[in-house]
């Protein structure tokens, strides 16, 4: 069955009930989400927002209390629905008795890759994540960053149509992070859907095309990254502005800051910044800079969870 | 079908790999080897016209004329009894951690994310575990059988029945290990419960005597229920001994009731595993 969405959830709900007390925790509360094929989607949220439970529901590690999830149009509960998925869990614990090669061989076999293909693919994948020298070493001797990279190789080994990555760059040094980003960019070029669950906002902002912010088990905000962070306003920096001009501009601006003879005014709309510019010109003051400003994802995130 | 086979082999290989890494396989293999070496070097039998002239153990010689066949069957019986109790205790002790280990957070999520059903994952582990122990049992029994056969010229095939019987007993006990492991994720608890069942078996087997001694009908009923419901390691051991001694055995009841117990335990474990959140 073909679907235009890699992930679709319908009113997905997970309620944890403690065995002895009658306490309920709604970890995921009626989430309906659609992730189009081929996009890079970021799932954000504060600790305890339900991100991990949501991801586990997609992979059937957690059984939803209500609602359903589909992966590429198939019911997520069917094992076959997980065949096109490559997954890297957060806080993964690969058995330390494996070597890098052994681990890749095992998980590739579980994904249905036959023996001949595995022999061919494993060295390629190790080279891709920069671990070709370390394939024969036991995982117990790997650093956190190396484990993360071999984990990514494990997720990629069966050429999945979608990658679900939980904190993919956790514990990885800046060079390794760049390497992981490059690998994921190549995957995106091949049309692989990438679903990232991360708390690193800068990373999600630079990498993801779409984002959903979860808060208290619900989707607090969802949209394209460009739409969420664009259109905030304009910043006008004026040098040596006289006091009467500052007072006049202050009434139009949303905020101002003054430092070293420069006053920065923030305007909400293009009309307002043009009016301000006319005033500055009539007073023969010098414009230092005029720049459109966007919201950072952090600002969007804070606004969404503080609503 | 192709995927199923690849996955099953991977799960079994993983169980072996973990058994090797935890030194479980080599531990059991070492013990079996010691026993085989014992028969190879320390037990010396001199035969004169089909009867044993001298038996030498630890360098001490006893002059006797005994029926060789009786002696060999006695040794076989001793080994079968050893396998049935001490062998099973060792095997259960060694296998106790193999189920809870796959349920560790960070490991189970990744296993479940693969296109493999939960039933397949657990059964793969179960079968892998049985094969680890089966290799050791077969090695021990075949090793002893070959050495005694070569030393005495008696190749009693009935001893080989101890291979399927002990594997069957282990499979039944392992179902308990799997259920407790899935329920409580505790290697210690699953080992303890299984060993208690092993210890209870010879006690419960004294049914006819106990039914005479117990005063009330309800206590007799409880005894009967426990006897029929729990695995009959003692009775199975006796069946195995009878077969080795070429004696007739009482019946198939201990086999099918123990098998039923194992099936119920394993089915419950599969049902619990299928419903659990990780």
Image (cartoon, coloured by chain):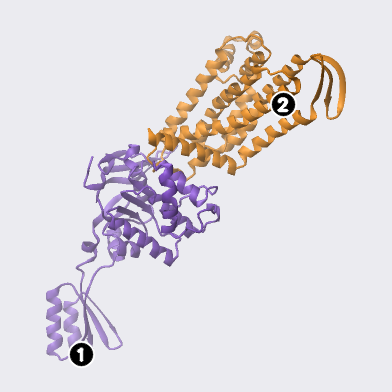
Please give the name of the residue rendered at 17% of the width and 81% of the height, measured from the top-left corner.
A249
* Mark 1 crowdedness (10 Å alpha carbons): few <14, some 14-19, many ≥20: few
Residue ID for mark 1: A242
Q: Nearer the viewer, residue A187 or A31?
A: A187
Quadrant of res A56: top left
Quadrant of res A289: bottom left
* SS for callout 1: loop
Question: From this viewpoint, is residue B203 visible?
Answer: no
Q: Is residue B164 left or right of residue A257?
A: right
Rendering coords of residue B48 (x, y %): 83, 16
Rendering coords of residue B105 (x, y %): 47, 46
- Tell me how far mark 1 sits from mark 2, CA to CA: 108 Å
| Subunit ID for the residue under disc 1 | A
Q: Are marks 1 and 2 in contact (CB under 8 Å)?
A: no
Question: From this viewpoint, is residue A31 visible?
Answer: yes
* Mark 2 crowdedness (10 Å alpha carbons): few <14, some 14-19, many ≥20: some
Quadrant of res A83: top left
Please, is residue B182 above or below residue B79 in the view? Answer: below
Chain letter of the purple region: A
Q: Nearer the viewer, residue A208 or B22?
A: B22
* SS for callout 2: helix
Q: Is residue A287 left or right of residue B4?
A: left
Outermost residue on the front side: it is: B49
Chain B, chosen colour in render? orange
């Amino acid at each position: 069955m073909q679907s235009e969405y890699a992930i679709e959830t319908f009113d997905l709900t997970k309620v944890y009930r403690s065995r002895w007390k009658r306490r309920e925790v709604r970890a995921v509360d009626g989430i309906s989400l659609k992730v189009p094929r081929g996009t890079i989607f970021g799932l954000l949220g504060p600790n305890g927002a339900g991100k991990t439970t949501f991801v586990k529901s997609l992979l059937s590690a957690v059984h939803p209390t209500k609602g359903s999830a589909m992966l590429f149009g198939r019911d997520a509960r069917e094992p076959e629905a997980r065949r096109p998925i490559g997954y890297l869990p957060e806080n993964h614990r690969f058995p330390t008795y494996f070597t890098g090669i052994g681990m890749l061989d095992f998980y590739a076999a579980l994904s249905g890759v036959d023996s001949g293909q595995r022999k061919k693919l494993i060295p390629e994948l190790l080279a891709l994540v920069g671990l070709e020298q370390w394939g024969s070493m036991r995982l117990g001797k790997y650093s956190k960053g190396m484990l993360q990279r071999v984990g990514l190789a494990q997720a990629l080994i069966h050429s999945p149509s979608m990658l679900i990555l939980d904190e993919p760059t956790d514990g990885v040094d800046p060079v390794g992070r760049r390497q992981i980003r490059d690998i994921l960019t190549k995957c995106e070029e091949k049309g692989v859907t990438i679903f990232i669950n991360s708390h690193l906002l800068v990373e999600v902002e630079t990498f993801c095309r779409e984002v959903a912010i979860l808060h208290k088990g619900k989707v607090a905000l969802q949209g394209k990254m460009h739409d969420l962070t664009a259109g905030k306003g304009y910043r006008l920096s004026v040098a040596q502005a006289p006091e009467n001009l500052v007072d006049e501009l202050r009434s139009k601006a949303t905020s101002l800051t003054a430092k070293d003879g420069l006053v920065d005014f923030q305007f909400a709309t293009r009309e307002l910044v043009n009016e301000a510019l006319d005033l500055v010109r009539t007073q023969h003051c010098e414009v230092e800079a005029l720049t459109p400003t966007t919201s950072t994802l952090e600002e969007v995130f804070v606004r969404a969870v503080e609503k | 079908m192709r995927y199923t086979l690849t996955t099953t082999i991977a799960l079994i290989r993983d169980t072996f790999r973990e058994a090797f890494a935890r030194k479980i396989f080599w531990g059991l293999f070492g013990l079996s080897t010691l026993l085989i070496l014992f028969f190879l070097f320390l037990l010396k039998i001199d035969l004169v016209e089909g009867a044993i002239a001298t038996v030498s153990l630890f360098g001490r010689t006893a002059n006797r004329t005994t029926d060789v066949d009786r002696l060999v069957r006695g040794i076989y019986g001793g080994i079968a009894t050893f396998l049935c109790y001490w062998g099973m205790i060792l095997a259960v002790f060694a296998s106790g951690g193999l189920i809870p280990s796959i349920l560790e957070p960070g490991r189970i999520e990744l296993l479940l994310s693969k296109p493999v059903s939960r039933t397949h994952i657990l059964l793969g582990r179960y079968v892998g575990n049985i094969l680890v122990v089966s290799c050791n049992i077969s090695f021990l029994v075949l090793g002893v059988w070959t050495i005694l056969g070569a030393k005495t010229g008696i190749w009693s095939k009935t001893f080989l029945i101890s291979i399927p019987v002990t594997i069957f007993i282990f499979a039944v006990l392992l179902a308990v290990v799997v259920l407790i492991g899935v329920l409580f994720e505790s290697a210690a608890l699953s080992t303890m419960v299984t060993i208690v069942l092993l210890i209870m078996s010879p006690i419960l087997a004294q049914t006819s005597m106990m039914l005479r001694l117990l005063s009330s009908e309800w206590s007799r009923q409880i005894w009967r229920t426990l006897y029929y419901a729990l695995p009959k390691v003692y009775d199975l051991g006796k069946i195995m001994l009878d077969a080795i001694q070429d004696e007739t055995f009482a019946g198939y009841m201990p086999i099918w009731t123990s098998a039923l117990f194992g099936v119920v335990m394993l089915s419950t474990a599969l049902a619990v595993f299928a419903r659990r959140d990780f």
